Each structure stands twice: as structure tokens, then as C-alpha cells.
Image (cartoon, coloured by chain):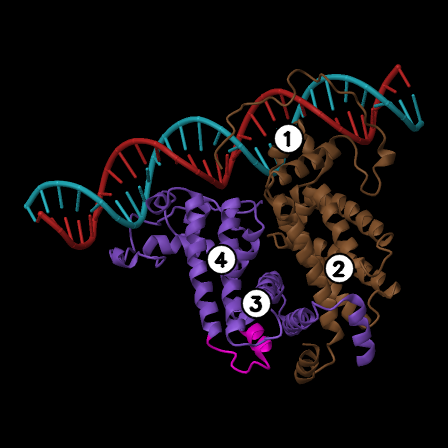
Chain colours: A brown, B purple, C cyan, D red
Amino acid sequence: MAESKRTWTYSQRFSEALPTQAHHQELDFMNVLTGGKLKLVQAALRLITESRSLTSLGLRELAREAGLNPNTFYRHFKNLDEFGLQVLGYIAEDMKSGVRELRRMAESSEQASHDTVTFVYHYFLSNPAATTVAVRELHGPSPLLRRALETQLNASAREMAEDIIDRRLVSAVPPETVHEISGMTIRYILFRAMDYIEKPEQREAIQRETERFINRQFRGAMLDHLSQTEVETLTSRLA
Amino acid sequence: MAESKRTWTYSQRFSEALPTQAHHQELDFMNVLTGGKLKLVQAALRLITESRSLTSLGLRELAREAGLNPNTFYRHFKNLDEFGLQVLGYIAEDMKSGVRELRRMAESSEQASHDTVTFVYHYFLSNPAATTVAVRELHGPSPLLRRALETQLNASAREMAEDIIDRRLVSAVPPETVHEISGMTIRYILFRAMDYIEKPEQREAIQRETERFINRQFRGAMLDHLSQTEVETLTSRLA
DNA sequence: CTTGACGGTATACACATGTATACACAACGA
DNA sequence: TCGTTGTGTATACATGTGTATACCGTCAAG
């Protein structure tokens, strides 16, 4: 709120150091960014990791961090909203590939939740910027970004649910319940991801707690069709 | 990001309309705000409800919304951080009284989760500003506010857990598990509260979904001590 | 009645921000 | 070869922001 006294010129001389690695706009399809565009997006991710929120980033701030002239921003984005969406697309790409990888592991079924949780948290840990922006903007002030993230999360949840169903990991629970629990789980994990990233000494605890969360959720769901009294007789029999 | 062309003077004439309802600083103890202080806090809550985030509020913006001169801000707060904490204290007061009320109801034990969830969501619904600020800042960019909210949430969770234990609502689950589940539940509900507030057509669904969440969590916890295979034989017997 | 705190106000300054306009240069297609 | 397009740059402007200083009325205590 009160820092930055530097006066700064964006390029120290005329236009030194311009390797001109550009002019492959054939790469610019489908979220594969290049040149200044990439620099700006990465600058945003850097700033976000140092605890700022995507919606609060300024055009000049971005350019400064990217080592560019403020006006270069306009060469690539119409305004800050469009920029935000591009950033979101960029990290969504990451997340999707993460989930896809996820589908290819956790063979054991007994330890499926353990493996999954381990993987997901490790993924978050190695993509702190993406995680932070997701958590922040999911409830942030921009309805646009919220919608976009919501869709993204739902897609991931659906993928996770279908995976569980396909492999019959919890065959005792009806599919729509698996979908519901998947959605809850994904949101819960995202919720905890910030703590996981920021508090290394709690990581083990958070991970185990999340596993308990998932197991209880699915085991509880197996008893969904029982009444309160039936559950009570069951537990008294178990005790 | 691009609005507001109004030139504005903070008081349209010299100093008309000053009912001078102040000078009861004897009320200014313990979060009971008065006068301009109150006006500023309420202005903040209003702005936050119209989708802004506490940390992004500006001094002048606040004063404008409160109908005060920007410098009046300094009469009450040293800086914006202190202001944020005061706002948090203000809403924490609300929340605490809400939870306390909660302890006094839900006699039925059979429908405890239903009653509780109903109450909590209704509370959120009638305090949208407090809810929004809590959700936003819980993962927001200010570590200070995050800590404060975290403490507040943990206190609420503890209270909820003790309530459940005292009344033996789920005697089949060990106390520390009740505490854990309480924490998860409170966070989950807060998580869903935004949707509950913003999407009236989904309220019923969200509420029922939350009840399922809680029930599964506790019922699942009853099976915590069982192994995977034991659970499987159990469910096959149930089918 | 004076004094001083309290809460309100106006004016001013230094700075940051979003945008607009115009310039520079490299690469490419005609 | 010449224009065009893409990408970078500098300068300028209006507006918003946090803060500093100083002025003014209202109370209540001395």
C-alpha cells in the first residue's frame, strides 16, 4: 500500500536487447503464448504468488514486472478483463493436463484415495501460482472469472467422478452420488491447497486429513439409504 | 475499472445537515461503533456486497460512499489496515452472536443437522456483507486478515464441536473426530454460502447437499476404525 | 468564559494509474 | 522494392489516490 519510489524507465536505452524471438504466430493458437504476451502472463503469475490477487493487478504493474513498456500491454490485450481470462486459460491448460495424468495412476483401488490426494497436492505444490489464482478468484469480485473457474472445476470433478465409476472403485455408491462427492472433494482440496502450500509443517497433517475426508464421504454415502435408527443399531452392533 | 465521472463535493454546502448525534463515546467500547466510524464501516460492507474485496477498498472511495470528507477517515483510523481489522471485528461480533443462538436450538437430535444447516444458511443470507468479506478474505492477499479470520473460524468450529459432544448427538464418534469434522463442515458451509446467497434458485439444493455432506461425514466417521475389506463385507451384507 | 478535544471540512501535493497518440524497426508478402 | 503488419517504445493527459496542513463548529470540563 505504500512502497515503490523508483522512477524506472522501461528499457534503459533505446531498444537494446531485443532478440526478436517473435514472429512465430503459428504457435499462438490455443493458449500457447509467445513473446510479450507470455512475459505479461508470467509476470502476473509471479505477482500473484507473492500474494496479490489477479483482479487487483494493474496494467503498469504488470508491464513493470514483465520489463515492458506499459503500452505494450495494449498490443496483446484489449483491457484487463481480457487479460484475466487469458491468464485463466493459461492455468486451466495446466490443470487439465494434471487431471489427465491423474487418470493414469492410482491402480491399486485400495489406496486410490491416498495416491490421488498425494498426487493432487504435489501438483498444487508445484503450481502455486495457478492454485493461488484459482482459490482467490473462485470467490473473487469478478463474476466473469468466477463463472470461468466454476466451469473448470465442474469439468475436473466430472472427470474425477467418471474415473472412479469406470474403475468401480466404490461400486456400492450410485453414480450421481459419486459425482456429488467428487465436486465436494475437489472444492475441499482446493480450499486446503493454500494452507498446504503456505504451511510446510502441516502438509502431512493436511494430506491425511483430506484422505479421511474422502473416505468418510464415500463410506458415509454407502449408508445413505439407511435411516437414523438403522444406523444406530448398526453402530451398536459394531461397537 | 472504468466508471465514475462525477466530480463530487463531499458536503454539498458548507456543513449542512449535521445532526450531531455523536458525543456518546461511552458507547465506543468493544466494537460498538458510532457516528462517522460506523458510517465508514457500513460503507465498506455496502461496497463489499456489491462485489469488491475488503483489501481493495480505497480511503477516498470509502469516504465517498459514507458521504464524508476523505480526511475524516484519519479521525477514526490510522490507516487502511487498521480499518480492515475493525471491520473484521465488527462482523466477528455478528458471527459470534449467530453461533451462540445456534447453541440454543436444534433440540431434536434426529434432525439436528437439518436444523443447524437451515439456521446457518439463513444467517448467511441475512448477513451477506459479513459472509462475503469472510469468504473473500479467508484466502485473500492479506496475511493479517487471513490469520484473524482463521482464528475466528476455529473458534466457531470448536464451539460447534463442543455443542455436538455435550448433547451426545453422535456419541459413536470420538471427540477429536467431531472437532475435525466440525472444522471441515464450517469451512464447507462458508464455501457454499456465496452460491447460496447469489443463486436463489439453487438454495434448496445447496442446503440439502450440505445436509448430505454432514451426515455422510459423521456416518463415515463411525466406520473409521474398520479396514477397507471389513467395509466391503459390511456393504455386501447391507445390499 | 475559556480551553481543549473531537469530528467534520477544504485545499494542496506528489505520485500512480489507464489511455491516447505518435514514432521506430523488424519481418514478410506483393 | 515498397507497403503492411506486428511488436516494441516515448510522451502526454486527465483522473484517482494517500497524506499533510490548516480551518471551523460543537460540546463538555475547568
Q: Which residue is mark 3?
A: B175
Return the residue nearer the eye: B196 or C16.
B196
CA distance separating discs 4 and 1: 36 Å
The amino acid at mark 3 is Pro
Say whether residue B112 is magenta. yes
Would residue A176 be visible to someone looking at this image?
A: no
Q: Nearer the viewer, mark 2 or mark 1?
A: 2
Q: Nearer the viewer, mark 4 or mark 1?
A: 4
Q: Which residue is mark 2?
A: A154
The amino acid at mark 1 is Glu
Q: Which residues are magenta?
A: B104-119
Chain of the residue under label 2: A
Q: Which residue is mark 1?
A: A65
Query: Helix or strand or loop: what does disc 2 sit on?
Result: helix
Q: Earlier in the sequence, mark 2 or mark 1?
A: 1
CA distance separating discs 2 and 4: 30 Å
Classify D13 as above or below B113: above
Classify B185 as above or below A192: below
Labelled pair 1, 3 in contact (Cβ < 8 Å): no
User: If the image is split into quadrants, where does the C terminus of chain A sit?
Assistant: bottom right
Q: Which residue is mark 4?
A: B152
